[in-house]
Every structure is written in structure tokens, then in C-alpha cells.
Amino acid sequence: MMENTSLMKLSRQGKISFFQPSWSLGTGIQSGFTTRNGGVSRAPFNSLNLGHNTEDQPSSVEGNFSTLARAFDLQTRQLLTCTQVHGVDVLLVNESNVDLSHFQDVKADAIVTDQRGILIGIQVADCFPLVLFDPVHQVSAVVHVGWRGASRGIIAKTISAMTREFDTDPAALLAAVGPGICAPSYEVDRPVREAFEKGTGNWRLIAKESNLGKWQLDLRLSCELQLEAAGVIAANTSVVKECTCCHRELFFSHRRDQGRTGRQLGFVLLP
């Protein structure tokens, strides 16, 4: 964890529990990162699986989204997610929409909006979810950061979109890095190294060789370094230190559960 960043604690809203950034407390902004608890899905997706593209029963996933919506006094039509493809495209929502469900099929790995009363979310289960909030222009964003997105600079691209569309000053941004897989649990191979060395992400600082042709990759550190490089002040960033792979009682983990698992949600709701 970078110096001066702050840790997050668990909060509860309705039936769900989530890690809440310290900067959102008492502001009216609802933001955070869900745990796997409080839903209706059965094993191995138990219980608050918020992943559309899983082998879970669709009715259970919809039930979980309904639970999430009720926790924040919303209708499910006010929840906005997209189809994540490990790319760097950013979905911009800057107009009012009666029904947000049609965005679910849009392929993107970040969402930026200035619209109030809608909850935007990114689905993860080892990749890192990021939340960004511009308190000056009242603009929010969620970002899905796996190794592909990190190596291709999706964090900087999202912040650039906020600056271009809404005049966001990166130094004024409040940021939160949600739960993801820790370096000791995340061994990667040469193609991942090549992607970072050709792209961005500070490979020499975030990777430690563990075996011949294998490295332990610290994606959390990469997120923090890329936020800082984009102009976000470390003191304005909250971080979840718990690892998704290590904490079965709290999180789904794609690597630990060999792909058959649910998804957490990183989210933000402007009042």
C-alpha cells in the first residue's frame, strides 16, 4: 500500500455488507465494494453473486441485484453495469435514461457519469475495482482493472475521459481501490510481463520473480502507482487491503475457485 493512503472498513446497508471509502462517509454519496454475503444464490455462488456472466441461476442473480437496489432505495432499472471484456473502452453516460438495462450489453471496462440517482457498478472476482469521484463537478466513475487493463492504462484513460468531458482536475479526485487478488496468490507468466513492458504499469516495481519464467504480480500496487501518475493525490485514496483469494468468507475468487464462482461489485451512487 502506498504511503498516506487510508484503509476501508466494513459497513452495512440493508442486507448487504460492503467496504466503504472513508471520504464518502457523511457526504450522501453511496460508494464501496460488496462482499459475497447477504444474497440468495446457492453454492458455489453463495450468496450475493452480482455477476451476470456466471453459471448461477439468472433468477438468483436478479434477486441479488434487487437486494442491492433495495438497500439503497432504488429500483433495479436504476442500476447500470456493462459487459466487461478486459479492454480499455470507457462508457460515458451524460444524459438521463429512463431504463439503464440496455447498457448491460455495451462492451466497456469503465463507466463515467454525472447523472444522479443511478448506481454504476463494475463486476470483479480477483481483478481490482476502482471508484473515482470528482467532488467539484459531481462526476463519478467505476473501473475494472485486470492485468490487461492495467498494462494498457485504463485508469489514465478513465481519468482523461473525466477531464475531457467534465473538466475534472485529477488532483481533486477522490479514489478508492477495492478488494482484489494479492501478489503472493497471483503468479503470472511471460506474456503478462511482456504486456506490461510494452505498455504501462511499472513492471519492475509491481512484479517479483517467483520461479523461472513466473512472477508474483502486485496489481493493487500497480493501481495505486497509476492513480498517482495520473495526478491523484495519495491522501485522497482509500484502499481495501484484504485479498479476494485469501478471504473465502468475504469474497469470490476466480483463481481460488477455478473459475466457477460469483462476482463482487464496485459501485458508486450520486444522490
Image (cartoon, rainbow, N blue to C red):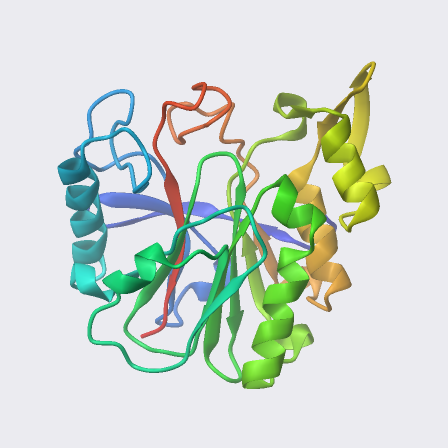
The picture places residue 80, in percent across and down from the top left corner, at 32, 61
Whether residue 71 can be seen here: yes
In this orientation, does residue 34 appear?
A: no
Front position in the image: 233 or 123: 123
Residue 106 in which image quadrant: bottom left
Marker count (numbered): 0
Q: Quadrant of the N terminus?
A: top right
Residue lying at 54% horizontally and 61% vertically, measured from the top left: 89
Q: Most extreme residue toward the right, as rendered?
A: 204
Is 83 positioned to the left or the right of 68 in the image? right
Q: Closest to the observer: 178 or 167?
A: 167
Residue at the extreme top of the image, as rendered: 211
Q: Is residue 221 above or below residue 172?
A: above
The C terminus: image quadrant = bottom left
Residue name at image x 36 percent, y 38 percent: 35
| Residue 59 position within the rendered picture, expressed as x and y whole percent measured from the top left | 13, 39
Q: Is residue 225 left or right of residue 177?
A: right
Q: Position of residue 167 (x, y in %)?
A: 60, 85
Q: Is residue 61 left or right of residue 220?
A: left
**Is 177 situated above or below 140?**
above
Q: Tell which of 98 and 5 is nearer to you.
A: 98
| Residue 225 vs residue 109, the one in the foreground | 109
> How far across and down, in percent of the image, does residue 14 sit?
19, 50
Residue name at image x 21 percent, y 37 percent: 39
Q: Residue at x 29, y 42 (%)?
A: 52
